[in-house]
Amino acid sequence: MGAPAAVFSVLPNRHLRPFDRKRDLNAVADLIELCFADTLDEDGRNYIKRMRFLSLQQNSNLPAWNEESIKLGGYVWEVDGQIVGNLTVQPYTGIFYPFDLKVMMIANVAVHPQYRRQGIARQLTQRALNDLRRLENVPIWLHVRADNRSAYNLYASLGFVEHFRRTLWVHESPLAMVDSENPYPAVTVKERTKKDWQQQKEWFLQTYPHEMWWYYAITPRLLQPGFVGLMCSLLSSINLFQWSVFLGEQLIGVAAWQPTAHTADYCWLMVEQDHEEQALSIVLPYLAYRVGSRKPFMVDYPVQRGAQVLQRLGFHQHQTLVWMSYC
């Protein structure tokens, strides 16, 4: 009778449980930092710093800090009291269109290197799906790096289906583009006007699919000229500055610049694919000149589109993400 008890006493105590904001913030921040050290950008590092600050705040007499960008829920995996696995569930609510859109996103799936290949990520994801499926008609999304084939295969085996592959491009010094040689003197840039809107809207729908608007928080209503766009901008606190690109008298693209409080400002590109090389070559240096910002520029664009001209202008690929939803 004693032998089995002795064997059992040395087995690790494993436990999958819901994330507890009051006691898990620091440990989860450490785990995310460890697991994603190679891919964390400045915004990611700031996100981890905010997690640690909130943890400190909860256990001190520091003044309350309302941090809306940290809305953490999900699950953790413990071994002998140590958190070695994490999965975050983040709710997203659509802005303006459609009004009632709500999406649940699975993120920060991380397993300590010493505990990988033991099925922890699978069990965390399966637990999340079991709970989220109880929410009727609520889409479940995640993204995974294109080079993380094992994670991709895991999600596919659990019922996630790939929809889009998109590359995040970053230019660290956009003002360096201003002095680049103009290879297309027939291409000009002007302020976007109401007559450009219908064509711009078509290009926007081709480049930024409506399934993703919940994540981008950029919709046709926000881009629309006139009263509708102005009201959406005021209500969302999102400012956009837009310019149209012409080849002679032909409209070949529209670009929008969005200043942000993050590390980089965003460039939204809506161009005719047949004239993509010409449009991007001229409008991106023009934006850098007009904006005059020393902050990096970030472009979220369909994979492989515009790659040559973006690289020529000095952008580098931050990462390519595969977007998947649960079916």
Image: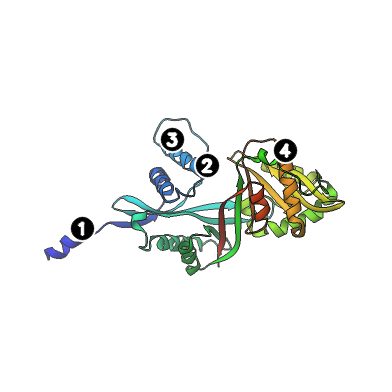
Labels 2 & 4 near each other (Cβ < 8 A): no
Provide the residue designation for mark 4.
289
Q: In the image shown, does 205 or 34 lie closer to the viewer?
A: 34
The residues bearing labels 3 and 4 have C-alpha atoms spaced at a distance of: 42 Å
The residue pinned by badge 1 equals 10
Q: Amino acid at mark 2?
A: Glu
Question: SS at mark 3?
Answer: helix
Q: Residues within 10 Å of mark 1 (few under 14, many from 20)?
A: few
Instruction: Categorize mark 4 by other alpha carbons within 10 Å: few (<14), some (14-19), many (20+).
Output: some
State the residue lying farthest toward the left: 2
**What residue did someone put label 3 on?**
57
* Disc nearest the viewer among 2 and 4: 4
Q: Earlier in the sequence, mark 1 or mark 2?
A: 1
3 vs 2, front mark: 2
- Image-quadrant location for residue 97: bottom right
Q: Which residue is mark 2?
A: 42
Q: Amino acid under label 4? A: Tyr
On the rendered image, what quadrant is the N terminus found in?
A: bottom left
Q: Is 303 rendered above or below residue 70?
A: below
Residue 123: where, in percent of width, then height?
40, 62
Q: What SS does tag 4 mark?
A: helix
Amino acid on which the number 1 mark rests in the picture: Val
- Quick one: label 1 or label 4, which is nearer the N terminus? 1
